[in-house]
Image (cartoon, grey):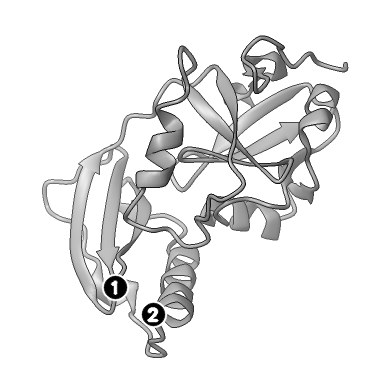
Amino acid sequence: MCQFIESIKVEKRQFHNLGYHQARLNATRERALGFADNLDLDNILEIPEFIGTETYKCRVLYGKDIEAIEFTPYQPKQINTLKLIENNEIDYTYKFADREKINRLFEMRGSFDDILIVKNCLITDTSYCNILFFDGKRWLTPESPLLKGTKRQQLLGEGKIFEARVMIEDLGSFQRFMLINALLDLDEDRSLPIDGIRGLDEKNAVHSGG
């Protein structure tokens, strides 16, 4: 049976965005595995005594049932550059524990910090984050992500970001980009110049249109 994961932010001894994780977990169990009963993370998860006020990642491994829960200190990776990698077969509709296909693409990054996956000419996600683009007025996120992340769904629901069809040739019209996931929130101080993204041949930089 397939295994799936939820990565949940814990800060100041509080779980963040738990409702979105709860909804995705049970939707995954129903659609991918056929189980209609709901697991209640509110009743299952408890913060261990050793957890302080720092930021931790709570990793929940599950299938039919919760199989493992672990807490690890969270230190964000420093990402400044992305290499465009094209793959039209990749599928990560659900947050699979098996990341072999994504890891193989990640190994193709060369000297770049991470990859930005292109599927059928459309921009999707990096190896572990959804991506946002700033057009001078609004933060936009690709309408065709590999995975609909919980932070992405929250920010869309709050009207802080907006979906858009983003193709490779559109990248030059943006000024900056930002990576988000369950542990990385919308924070313009973390945004980076768009020319940190390079073309498929690794030779052509994406230049800002602004």
Who is closer to the viewer here, 23 or 128? 128
Which corner quadrant holds the N terminus?
bottom left
Please indicate, yes or no, whether residue 187 appears anywhere in the rendered image.
no
Relative image position of residue 155 (x, y in whole percent): 64, 52
Residue under numbered circle 1 = 63
Which of the image's four quarters has the C terminus?
top right
Regarding mark 1 in the picture, which secondary structure is present there?
loop
Q: Three-letter amino acid code at disc 1?
A: Gly
Question: Vertically, is 48 above or below 40?
Answer: above
Farthest bottom residue?
36
Residue 26's x, y, as percent? 43, 77
> Mark 2 or mark 1: which comes first in sequence?
2
Name the residue beneath numbered marker 2: 33
Q: Residue at x 26, y 62 (%)?
A: 61
Left of 120 or right of it: where is 19? Answer: left
Residue at 78% across / 38% down in the picture? 167
Q: Element at badge 2?
A: helix
Residue situated in front as seen by the camera: 73 or 52: 73
Residue 83 appears in the rendering:
yes
| Residue 130 falls in image quadrant | top right
